[in-house]
Image (cartoon, rainbow, N blue to C red):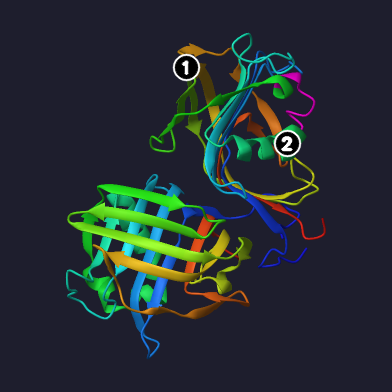
Amino acid sequence: MPLSEPITPGVVDWTGENPGILLKNDDDSFAAMALFFRVAWSPVGQGQVLLLYGSPNEVDAPTDAPNILVSDNADLSEYLLENFIGRLAAFRDAPAFDNLHHINAQSIHSSGDPMSHRYTETVSGEGYTVELVWEDLEPPRALELMPDQVGSGVHTMFTVLVPAQAAQIIVNGRSLPGKLGTRVQAGFETTSAFLYFSETWIIPPQVP
Amino acid sequence: MKRISINPGRVDWSGENPGIYLKHHQDDEAYCLLSLFFRVVLSPYGKGHAAIVLAAPDTAQGWPQETNFIMTDNQRMMRWIVDGWVSKMPTFVGRAGLQQMSWLDLDSVQRQPGDLKTDYREILRGSGVTLEMHWSNLGDPLPVEVTAENSATKEHEMYSVFLEAKSAAVTVNGTELPGAVQSRQFFGRTMSTAFLAFSETWVTPANQ
């Protein structure tokens, strides 16, 4: 619930959409990981970015399961890589992080309805077409999280979460292997496939 | 008040909701132009875009006799939002122009974000109308979280990221509508009557 003070203290880092799909192997390691960003405001402008670890545990990934960063704003992809993705341990610590292939996006579009059954983001560029598919969507929930409740560990964050009970990462028509896992966010048990809308990351003021 | 991480309320809709309110003179009591833009990414009635323009807010006549219209690609969603939100906002409540505005079909929306500091434009086309909303001289993003008691509708909690625009203009079919940005009290600060609003989410509190 909002606090009675209407202006949240701190500096906005970025705001927009940030859905993702994390697929796991039977041994609970990550099989494939994807984060999508549709940024409405950042210090380096608007834009859209797809981060795909088709092979999270490989520095040199095969072309049918690539490790790529696809964007229509190269400055934004660098900004997010350095200031945000690099703070998320699951992504920063994966071998894929050190050898991402940067690609200029040729087309990016969403389809479906986040309050219905299915929603997708499709990103194309340099011979790759990556489709993220979320299905069996749950009702949206508004979240207000403090730095100790978010992956970056340093932000206050507001968002609208739509959990998905089923999801796929499809690269050039081939669905990457792996299955959804569970995760707990601020005491709320959910899945590793999620839509996040109207998400705002704020650096709180320094406490003296 | 203690923050509750998972808001127990119902998410109604989420998206972007910038506006431009103009007066002829700062001392005028009434606005001569009220305009709002909507980019809705999540609602019970799907996604969609819209713009409301009331250049004769207190005249019970629609387009083309008066420049009082709404353009939208999702009329069902926008009738729900006009009834539940816009008509309850202090700036719009009881306005004859809102009740009698013409409902026009929207064919396309084009965002021209510029560098998010000097310029931002939304250009809408449809039903023989080309509408351009232009915000300029933008400030830093300001995160807000508003309780139902403090919100514009007095019924909903609201989260958003506001960017104040020191100047703005609304143009319909090449003609700039009269009026200028003024200042107003907003969440305890003196701010202008033109603003961008990203990542805006409206929530019905759990006790309603």
Tell me how far mark 1 sits from mark 2, CA to CA: 26 Å
Q: Which residue is mark 2?
A: B83
Q: Is residue B94 visible?
A: yes
Judge left or right: residue B91 versus residue B13. Answer: right
- Callout 1–callout 2 Cβ contact below 8 Å: no
Q: Secondary structure at mark 2?
A: helix
What is the x, y in percent for residue B93? 78, 29
Q: Residue at x 54, y 67 (%)?
A: A163
What is the x, y in percent for residue A134? 45, 64
**CA neighbours of label 1 inside 10 A, class few (<14), some (14 to 19), many (20+):** few
Which residue occupies the extreme bottom position in the image? A27
Question: Do the residues indicated by labels 1 and 2 lie within the same chain of the protein?
Answer: yes
What is the x, y in percent for residue A124? 26, 53
Q: In the drawing, what numbered circle is on residue B13?
A: none
- Image quadrant assignment for residue B90: top right
Camera-side residue of A206 and A79: A79
What is the x, y in percent for residue B174? 45, 13
Residue B95 belongs to the span the image colors magenta: yes
- Name the image quarter holding the C terminus of chain B: bottom right
Residue bounds of the magenta highlight: B89-97
**CA neighbours of label 2 inside 10 A, class few (<14), some (14 to 19), many (20+):** few
Q: Residue at x 48, y 65 (%)?
A: A135
The chain identifier of the residue carrying mark 1 reads: B
Q: Amino acid at mark 2?
A: Asp
- Image quadrant assignment for residue A177: bottom left
Secondary structure, magenta segment, majority class = loop
Mark 1 or 2, nearer chain start: 2
Q: Is residue B143 visible?
A: no
Q: Which residue is mark 1?
A: B128
Q: Secondary structure at mark 1?
A: loop
Judge left or right: residue B28 versus residue A178. Answer: right
Judge left or right: residue A132 versus residue B140. Answer: left
